[in-house]
Amino acid sequence: MHNIASIDVEQDIIQANDKLAYENRRILDENNVFAVDLVGAVGSGKTSLLEKLIDEMEDDIGVIAGDILSKFDAKRIEDKNVPVKGLNTGKECHLDAHLVEHALPDIPLEDISILFVENVGNLICPADFNLGTHVRTVIISVTEGDDTAEKHPMIFKGADMAIVNKVDLADAVGADADKMVKDVKTINPDIPVVKCSLKTGEGVDEIIALYKKFQSKK
Amino acid sequence: MHELSMANSMVEAILDTAKKNDAIQVTEAVLEVGELTMLNPEQLRFMMDVLREDTILKDAEIIINMIPIEIECESCGFKGVSKTDEEMDHLMAVATCPKCDNTRVHIIQGQECNIKTIKIEKED
């Protein structure tokens, strides 16, 4: 005969990630670094936005660039001569707080004031994983279709700011950028949404101003 | 493959608890998965089945209880289960106040991915 026992586990996998995220936040705050989790689909313009911000912002920027396998994104940021750590998730579709925790020691936090964490290209899975950053930005582009926000509500529900990118292409692809802004606002009424074109530069100043505002409120 | 990392963490946590309690076999595991996690229970189950092969969790019954979305409305104060319209393609998972249609709501439950209890066998 074997003894049978029932054990209360009550262990939440998402809360376990949140604990690690809290520790990441503590490290960032100790070093006075303002951190942004940048999420968006494949091809939405995450890396292009970072390149633009590195050029336009006066702050010392560091980047953690998440990717499934390649180092392409990290290489593009490296070319801008800022500290960057490429993070490969292997088969996972999102970064989690544990992965970011391992990347932080490779970024000279004492030399930077803003850290951008470029998440893996995906609008679904990252929604569940807090990384410990101060702000989450979601970037979507008109070329993904103007129903993108409606189809991925949770990522907008948990975000602090949203960017609708490639608005210069809206007519060409038959998309309504204003509808996308409206949809994001329906899902998350308090979120600032910027219409942007990284090609023409439209909206970039507004994005930088928003980061300044968030950073001062940190 | 969000399900894979969740399944992996769950299997690890169950085996860890089982080991700490000197289990020789896990016979049941009860999980609670919130509807807002976007986890598909069938995929989660499939991933767990692959991951628990060759472990003491191999023959356990895995019970997955889906947790409905509960919200508190900022506008009208409603507290309870949020409406999800299965006929609707879009915005389906957004927590909306069933009383006043407001989307400025706090989510009380529906985001968890919890291992509730396990049943184990031990040596005498």
Image (cartoon, coloured by chain):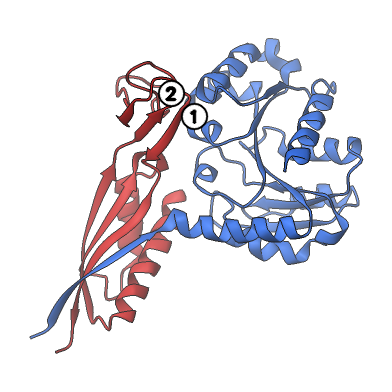
Chain colours: A blue, B red
- Return the x and y of residue A134 as percentages of the image width and height: 67, 45
- Of all residues, the one furthest to the left in this rendering is A1
The crowding category of the residue bearing disc 2, from other C-alpha atoms within 10 Å (few below 14, some 14 to 19, many at least 20), is some
For residue A74, side relative to residue A5 (left or right): right
Of the numbered discs in the image, which one, if any, rests on residue B91?
Answer: 2
Q: Amino acid at mark 1?
A: Pro
Q: Residue tagged by mark 1?
A: A153
Number of numbered discs on residues: 2
Mark 2 vs mark 1: tell me if same chain.
no
User: Is the Cβ of the residue at disc 2 closer than 8 Å to that at disc 1?
Assistant: yes
Where is residue B51 drawn, in percent x and y? 36, 65
Name the subunit of mark 1.
A
Q: Is residue A73 visible?
A: yes
Which residue shows up at 45% across the image and 23% down it? B103
Left or right of A181 on screen, residue B47:
left
Instruction: Choose top left, top right, bottom left or bottom right for residue A111.
Output: bottom right
Left or right of A23 in this view: A11: left
> Horizontally, is A155 left or right of A133 in the view?
left
Q: Residue furthest front?
A: B77
Q: Nearer the viewer, residue A29 or A87?
A: A29
Residue A164 or residue A111, whichever sits in front: A111
Dot 1 falls on a residue whose secondary structure is helix
Query: Can I make out residue B81 in this image?
Result: no
Circle 2: element type: loop
Kindly give the residue lying farthest to the bottom in the view shown. Answer: B124
Image position, residue B3 (x, y; %): 41, 51
Residue B94 falls in image quadrant: top left
- Please state which of residues B92 and B40 is positioned toward the viewer in this rendering: B92
Residue A31 sits in quarter: bottom right
Q: Residue at the spot x=77%, y=35% of the render?
A: A211
Q: Amino acid at mark 2?
A: Leu
